[in-house]
Amino acid sequence: MRRVSAVLMRVACVVLLALVASAAGALAASDITTHRLRFDPGTSQATRSGTIKGYQTVDYLLEARAGQTMTVRLDISNSAGYFNVVPPGSETAIHIGSTSGNSFTGRLPTDGDYSIRVYLMRSAARRGESGRYTLHVGISDDGATADLSRRNPDYADGLSGGPDFWRVAGLAAGDTLNLRSGPGTTNGVDAELDAGAVVKNLGCRMVDGTKWCRVELTGDPAMRGWAAGRYLVEAPAP
């Protein structure tokens, strides 16, 4: 009898743990806020602003048709903030901001509700960071790109979030990462960083849809410049 009771107790504990895990998952899912995005009459563009913190995620649903061109740009004060574009009936994004940058222009493959998902990278969310954002969305029928031009916001003040240190990664074998005098490929190359180099994060900004980060080589404060963010990954303090 005691053995049966012990077995039943263990089963009850397993069930209880499963219920707790399920409740935790439901709680995490509740951090996703969904808004329906509609254009004002006679317009084909919309702008929305807000703030996200930690694991909060905001989905903007926009109904669109196959063949239309969607243009999206995200301005956000936290360099770890991005957006994805997810087509109707799918969990596979057609744009991933963390790898492709915070601007998107593309011809839509199908009719339905497209989800534009604004979020923070997990590392920033875990630290409870926040970001103020403005999302610009446009739709055109003839394949033309909606004009979402603006002055590039400068969030390179070192206080906008993101990791304290980056590591150079993702280069082809034998390649180096250019350290430029300013954000963008039109600026001159002042130095080169080897794969695996650890640099201090001095802040990032978006330029023409590409993330550029101002960095300082650890151990050499005089070696500062701007590097393409797609080749930088979070690193621990050296």
Image (cartoon, rainbow, N blue to C red):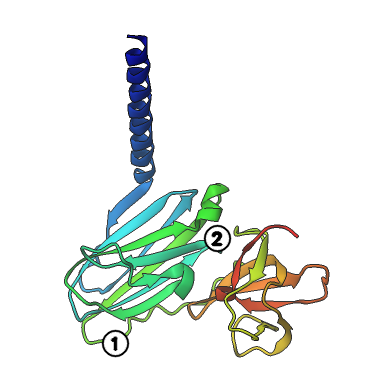
Q: Where is residue 231 in the image (x, y as percent from the top left)?
A: 58, 75
Crowd around label 1: few <14 · some 14–19 · many ≥20 (10 Å): some
Q: Quadrant of residue 155?
A: bottom right
Residue 90 appears in which quarter of the rendering?
bottom left
Judged by depth in the image, the label closer to the viewer, 2 or 1, is 2
Residue depicted at 29% across the width and 54% down the height: 35
Residue 7 visible from this viewpoint: yes
Estimate the x, y position of residue 236 in percent, counting from the top left: 68, 58
Q: In the image, is residue 238 above or below residue 221?
A: above
Amino acid type for the residue under numbered disc 2: Asn
* Residue closest to the eye, 7 or 167: 7
Question: What residue type is disc 1 on?
Answer: Ala
In terms of image quadrants, where is residue 47?
bottom left
Q: In this view, does 90 lie to the left or right of 162?
A: left
Q: Label 2, secondary structure: give it.
A: loop
Looking at this rendering, what residue extends furthest in the top direction? Answer: 1
The residue that disc 1 covers is 144
